[in-house]
Image: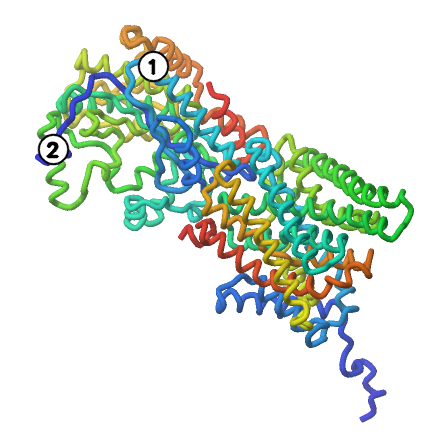
Amino acid sequence: MNPADFPFIPAWPPAVTPLAWVALLLLLAIVAGEATRRWLRVSRVIGYLLVGAALGPHAAGVLDTNTVLTLRVFMDIAVGLLLFELGQRVDLGWLRRNPWLLVTSVFEAMLTMIAVYAVMRLLGVAVVTAAAAGVLAMATSPAVVVTLVKDLRAQGQVTERVMLFTALNTTYAVIGLAVIFGWFHAENARSPIMIVTHPMYLIIGSLLLAGLLAAGMILLLRLFGRSPAFQFAITVSIVLLTVAAASSLGVLLPLTLLLLGMLARLFDRERHFVSLRFGQSAMLFVVLLFALAGTSLEFRGWSNALPMALGFIAARYIGKLVPLLLLAKVSSLTPRKASLVQLGLTPMSGLALLMLSDLSEQAPALVQEIAASMYLAITILAFAGPIALQFALRRAGETAEDAK
Amino acid sequence: MSDIMQFGPSKALTFGIELELQILNRRDCDLARGADDLLRVIAAGKSTSDIKPEITESMIEVATGIHERYADALAELRAIRETVVTAADRLNLLIAGGGAHPFQHWSERKIFDQPRFKQISALYGYLAKQFTIFGQHVHIGCADGDSAMYLLHAMGRYIPHFIALAGSSPYQQGVDTAYDSSRLNSVYAFPLSGRAPVVERWADFVAFFEKMKAAKVVESMKDFYWDIRPKPEYGTIEVRVFDTPLTVERAAVLAAYVQALARRLLIDRPVTVDDDLYLTYTYNRFQACRFGLDGLMIDPHSHEHVPIHEDIEATCRMLAVDAMELQSTEALNQVALWARERISDARWMRERYAETESLADLMWKQSQYWRAGS
């Protein structure tokens, strides 16, 4: 037989297109997610991460770095939807009605930063780099929090507070990172103007972009009424537009999205959002997000990186625990529930990886000394975090299962 | 006779009010699980009023002390409202009146962790969770068990008034049920709902209860879900057909109306307690649930058909002296106005819903109405 007679049969093996990667990754991740939930009784998120990690460049290498980069747009969409939803669920008015929550949040983020900074300095890390590690430690993974809360259909004080503190500490961390960029410029003796203008551009640019799009979103909702399907479509399109605009303008994507959610809710005087159903539609993107985040997780070089990674995790734990316990009573929560809230703030995941890679891009030399330990710490918390959060919400009796 | 059935006499015509309230989240105004946190915050404050858990985690029950005057009961209800709303603010929760939540899914409700509630849930299954409905109970003090039984049956004729004046549950499970009080339909699904047996003397009632208990149908008076039931340990009869009104002000007016009516019935003794009394009872009750103030009621003796609002207006004229004596003329005038103008909470809810056609938005407005009052 002459292959020339069968020109319609493609060469073997057939080319694997990005779409095929998406489909395969999705299938495997969904199966693994179901398996971890059923047999290990832990969150599906763990299964998604494991699939990504197993196929990723650091392990089997089926998915190389280039392929991951071509799939980056799916990650951005997922991050966009999740961060917007978190922002939109956060009620800034609550901080006015219970000001101790703001105090708790600021104290929690600050002490985390200081504790991690101190540990890093003790381990001989440079000042700016130690501060950068401290800033990274502040943030709780918004993706894990939103995904688990929806997955478990959790509701109650612990759930609400974990979401509030996550939105706020992520905001602080992203702003903190912008300031660190300025500091890097100072260390590298760049022009003094840039030291100030770079962070200013990032922060004010994000705020303006978010404000503009939030106002546009509310205007559209007002014009076109309250049909849930329409509301959902409008919201998703504007979130995608925000993702695109934030990347094009080079402002802070996570900050812009969180602010978009929070400002949209704040501007929503006629309460269009009370009837918004965000539902499970973003689920597929979320699965991909975690699977792709899994590909960046680092499993090698553990022994050298381990002491610093453990120091980081311990300092972060204490930094979050002390303020929450101290301020439990004044913010109207029992110490037991406050400690569950603290446990719920454990997750670190995609956002931390993103911030770390931003840092490496801006100042490769400075981040070098902590990079391995940071990747390891994030890897540990990416797995421990969802387990801790699920445990906390269950113990608080706030998941849908508890209603049965 | 067992001790729990000893009728502990109380001062006649004193009254107390219990209200079951909805706890909502601020995001989409669905019912929230927050009773235990809310009760803890309230307990840490300095309120002396009685605030308790109810069957699911999405409701609490508040109760006034014993009052003789409408104005005092209103003042206490307003203080309770202040306490509850302040605590809810700290937890980012909303409080609302209304007899039912318009779009909650009963399967999502969580039974409050207390043995009695768990037992009810085990016995009645989904009915217990569907029982996430919110009522107002008005207790009227009676000097002795015999006058309590007389008052209970004499009041029966006025049950449609109470239902129509308080109806505030037009929406359930996401739809307009067409009823002003759909909540009562949920109550009537229970096997021990309905009305008390036609006996006029307390001793006869105790005999009835002992028989039901011996047959193991009930364990205590709490197992009867009657429209009006005697509460021997308080020395009261308890009127239970009211939906929780949208404001505490309306709740106080309704209680004052029952009090004035009780005074007139105990003085005039116009009713003969016999089976005929209940001839048209369930029909009238249905009319009140379905059509509210526009419903028709049929007099069991004259067989005359009268719109409920007209009957209320006539009753208000009859009670003028009683209201004056009880210093509740203001409340009685309010009732007459509501009847004349057909002002009801169910109507308020339907009008607010029409503005945005969003039940979530309606619940938001209901919570703001509860907070602002009147």
Residue most extreme to the bottom: A1
Along the line of sight, which residue is nearer the eye, A120 or B79? A120
**Which residue is pictured at 53% across the width and 40% down the height?**
A327
* Residue A134 appears in the picture as rendered: yes
Indicate how the structure is coloured in the image: rainbow
| Tag 1 subunit | B
Q: Secondary structure at mark 2?
A: helix
Tell me the amino acid under the disc marked 2: Val
**Which residue is pictured at 61% across the width and 69% down the height?**
A50
Distance of label 1 from label 2 (alpha carbons): 32 Å
Query: Counting other residues with Cα less than 10 Å from the Cα at mark 1, is it few (<14), some (14-19), or many (20 or more)?
Result: many
Q: Secondary structure at mark 1?
A: helix
Which picture quadrant has residue B317?
top left
Image position, residue B171 (x, y; %): 46, 35
Q: Is residue B215 above or below residue A124?
A: above
Can you tell which mark lies on residue B206? 2
**Which residue is pictured at 79% across the width and 39% down the height?**
A204
**Which residue is pictured at 14% across the width and 27% down the height?**
B7
| Tag 2 subunit | B
Comparing labels 1 and 2, the label whose residue is closer to the camera: 1
Image position, residue A126 (x, y; %): 76, 56
- In which quadrant of the rendered image does the N terminus of chain A lie? bottom right
Query: Counting other residues with Cα less than 10 Å from the Cα at mark 2, is it few (<14), some (14-19), or many (20 or more)?
Result: some
Which residue has dot 1 on it? B70
Q: Decide which of tag 1 and tag 2 comes sooner along the chain.
A: 1
